[in-house]
Image (cartoon, rainbow, N blue to C red):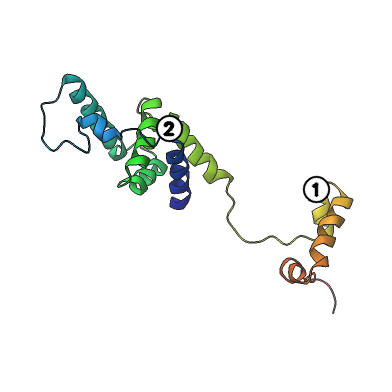
Amino acid sequence: SGGDLETELDREVKKEDDGSQNAHQLATGTDATSKKRKEKTPAQKAAHARYMKFSRSFERRDCPKEMKRAYSNAHYCKEKLAVLRDAWEQCEGEWKRSALYKRFVEKNTTTQHGARVWLTRSQVARKYESQSMADKICNAKLQDAETKEKNSKEHPGARK
């Protein structure tokens, strides 16, 4: 989801050095104090061309939707854009080879969404392959009144 991607980018931004220049400043050869536009050196022109290639990579058909979403979330945050740019540089423009992309995909496939599954004591024992473990889990849920109310209910097939 979008929030997961943004959180992941936030973590990456925190890893970055706070004193470093952002990618756009490096690409354009500007800094916060310069107001006049200077002639660009060949190295600055090449860096700018590389930055533009990076930004256009999100418009390509083969750009994964996770990366497009991450770019959309990071669009006005220089630190997040720098993280995305570093990931793009490391994978040489192939987003599906990016460690950041793999982390997004892995996070999405391992995150479970859905309804609560109610298990009987015997089903819990089969799941954990231990009757004693099932007893410990069930007894822990039944001891506290609040937990008992939220995490247990009568079996639908039980007679009243």
Camera-side residue: 159 or 72?
72
Secondary structure state at the residue bearing disc 2: helix
Name the kind of residue labelled 1 in the image: Tyr
Camera-side residue: 82 or 118?
82
Residue 47 visible in rendering: yes
Name the kind of residue labelled 2 in the image: Lys
Q: Which mark is residue 128?
A: 1
Left or right of residue 98: residue 156: right
Identify the residue at image location x=38%, y=46%: 69
Q: Position of residue 146 (x, y in %)?
A: 74, 71
Q: Position of residue 111 (x, y in %)?
A: 57, 48
The correct choice, above or below, for 29 with respect to 131 in the image is above
Give yes or no for contact between labels 2 and 1 (Cβ–Cβ under 8 Å).
no
Camera-side residue: 71 or 81?
81
Image quarter of residue 42: top left
Residue 91 visible in rendering: no
Q: Which residue is mark 2?
A: 96
